[in-house]
């Protein structure tokens, strides 16, 4: 059974940090695009960061460049998102996703991904 399970969300004050994890099971982790996405209430899902797990190719949304870092541990089939200098605009449900072929609209487009986790809430207070 294919599963993506996020953890590490929570509440933090502006300027703080969180690290999200996404444990992947039931599908090949290596040589696959993996991504982090977020959705705030009333807004569209937004691509935050993505990585090609076969190499160290990473991509970031403009709003998080320099603050967030995506990484992966291929031995643990786990994806990470280190989030630093958080601000209230980062408040959202964060989900990890895995590509499985099909339509390609770029590494930060939700439509490029097939498997999704349930998400974890991140709340940043001012």
Image (cartoon, rainbow, N blue to C red):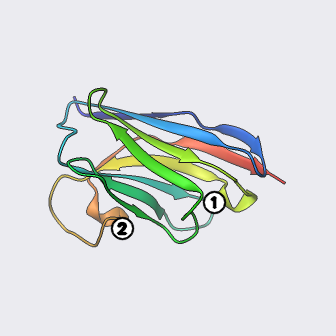
Residue under the point 49% across and 51% down: 69
Q: Secondary structure at mark 2?
A: loop
Residue 109 disc label: 2
Measured in 3D between alpha carbons, the distance from the residue under mark 1 to the one under mark 2, in whole angstroms, is 19 Å
Front residue of this view, candidates 108 and 41: 108
Q: Position of residue 67 (x, y in %)?
A: 60, 57
Residue 81: give its label: none
29, above or below 62, in the image: above
Please tell me how crowded label 1 is: few (under 14), some (14-19), or many (20+) other residues with Cα within 10 Å: few
**Which image quadrant: the C terminus?**
bottom right
Q: Position of residue 15 (x, y in %)?
A: 76, 51
**Which residue occupies the extreme right position in the image?**
126
Q: Is residue 43 left or right of residue 114?
A: right
Looking at the image, residue 113 sits to the left or right of residue 16; the answer is left
Q: Which residue sits at x=58%, y=69%?
A: 63
Q: Say few, some or many: other residues with alpha carbon within 10 Å of mark 2 (under 14 / 14 to 19 / 20 or more).
A: some
Quadrant of the rendering where the N terminus is positioned: top left
Instruction: Kindly identify which residue carries mark 1.
Output: 41
Q: Is residue 26 above or below residue 61?
A: above
In-front residue for pair 37/118: 37
Look at the numbered disc 1 and give the secondary structure of its residue. loop
Q: With 108 as the anchor, is 92 left or right in this view?
A: right
First along the sequence among labels 1 and 2: 1
Residue 118: % across, % down: 44, 40
> Left or right of 50: which side holds 6?
right
Classify residue 101 by image quadrant. bottom left
Front disc: 1 or 2: 2
Image mark count: 2
Q: Are marks 1 and 2 in contact (CB under 8 Å)?
A: no
């Amino acid at each position: 059974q294919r599963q993506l399970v996020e953890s590490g969300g929570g509440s933090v004050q502006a300027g703080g940090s969180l690290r999200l994890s996404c444990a992947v099971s039931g599908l090949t982790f290596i040589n696959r695009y993996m991504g982090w996405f977020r959705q705030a209430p009333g807004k569209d899902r937004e691509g935050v960061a993505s990585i090609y797990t076969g190499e160290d190719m990473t991509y970031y949304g403009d709003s998080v460049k320099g603050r967030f870092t995506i990484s992966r541990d291929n031995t643990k089939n786990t994806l990470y998102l280190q989030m630093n200098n958080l601000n209230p605009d980062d408040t959202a449900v964060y989900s990890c996703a895995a590509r499985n072929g099909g339509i390609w609209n770029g590494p930060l487009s939700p439509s490029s991904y097939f498997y999704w986790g349930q998400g974890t809430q991140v709340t940043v207070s001012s």
